[in-house]
Amino acid sequence: MADKPRSIFEDVQTSQKPAAAPGAIDRAGGQGARGAIRRWLMVIFALVALMIAVGGMTRLTDSGLSITEWKPVTGAIPPMTAAAWEVEFEKYRAIPEYQLQNAGMTLSEFKAIYWWEWGHRQLGRVIGLVWALGFAWFYLARKIPTGWTRRLLLLGALGGLQGAIGWWMVHSGLQEGMLDVASYRLATHLGLAFVIFGFLAWYVFLLGRREADLMQARRAGEPRLFGMSTGLMHFAFLQIILGALVAGIDAGRAFPTWPLMGDGFLPPDPFTLTPLWRNFFEDAGLVQFVHRMVAYGLFAYGIFVWTRARRSPNHRTRFAFNAMLVVMFLQVVLGIVTALYSAPVQIAILHQIGAVALWVLILRARYLARYPLVQSIREGA
């Protein structure tokens, strides 16, 4: 049978739709998968923020060494009987922290620090599970936008690495003569947490708009302001690492004076340890001094970047940098109060939460310098 002649309009009138390419966005629903992935990442973002706060409380309450084994799966189940609690307590009594610092601790006191560390590890497991389930669903449903698979896999890889670094950190505190975890390992652990948090924030910002809108917005971006805010981001990250070094050796409780370090500008005898580099990690006075000096430098540079941002033609960009400067000022005040009161738990944890808020606001301001939001002429004025 001969083929029936086709109308030249027949192909475009067909009800069948071409198959979507793997990883393509379904645009029938507006934002499509971008919106759903953004909400998923926002959940992880909130969990990581909580994780940083719980990790800070774990350190401030000296709870980090209460669990002496790394059991990623079976460790999710806490002791359920009196006998199981005695087994865990006996393991803790075998480490230097108990023998040299907490000898005589009761079982009820041990339970208090145990729950902080268990909660910290359990939250890590929850974050890993939320990422894994979400990624698997979006990948199998072919809902991941083009170019985003590697980004989302990066988050999972960094999360797995963070778990390994967490045990590497705890293991250092179980060695002979150690009363706490090694400060540089604590700094690595916290630093990676902020890296993960930063990626999450940036991805959430990017997914808030379509790729075409981002490309158009970039043409109106401010490269110089973006470069300056990138420098501010790196400066803030350095200060976060130094803050972890302070927390790692309880240096925040060493000199409850301000603006001087005791009776002078410099702490007394800042270079007594050998080799020389150990002083920058283990001398409480010097570690706190460096943290203070970098804070002053960061605040000064933050003001400098803010003065440049005031000239931005976009009012939302200007507002983002205004918010960043306000929180940076509050963070400086919190740091001073933390030092003056010898880092009590309540104020010290507020200082750490302030670092989280400041980090996000710096990233938000940097994002708007790169991808400014559309505004009317009246809004710009």
Image: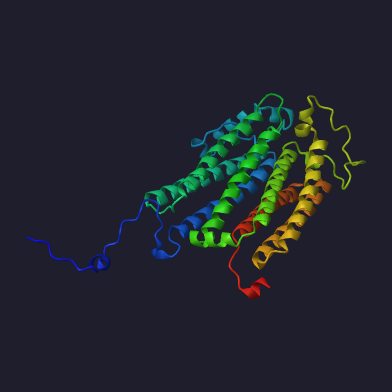
Q: Is residue 46 visible?
A: no
In the visual, does 322 lie left or right of 137? right
Question: Which residue is depicted at the point 76% across and 38% down?
Answer: 250
In the visual, does 101 lie left or right of 75? right
The front one of 319 and 360 is 319
Question: Which residue is depicted at the point 67% across and 52% down?
Answer: 227
Question: Which residue is depicted at the point 75% across and 33% down?
Answer: 281
Give how far across and how far down residue 344 sits, in percent: 77, 47
Q: Where, by quadrant of the figure, is residue 104 drawn?
A: top right
Give how far across and how far down residue 241 sits, in percent: 70, 41
Q: How many marks?
A: 0
The front one of 71 and 206 is 206
The N terminus - image quarter: bottom left
Q: Where, by quadrant of the figure, is residue 3 drawn?
A: bottom left
In the visual, does 238 lie left or right of 14? right
Q: Where, by quadrant of the figure, is residue 263 drawn?
A: top right
Q: Is residue 182 above or below residue 291?
A: above
Give how far across and how far down residue 182 sits, in percent: 69, 32
The front one of 207 and 263 is 207
The front one of 339 and 235 is 235
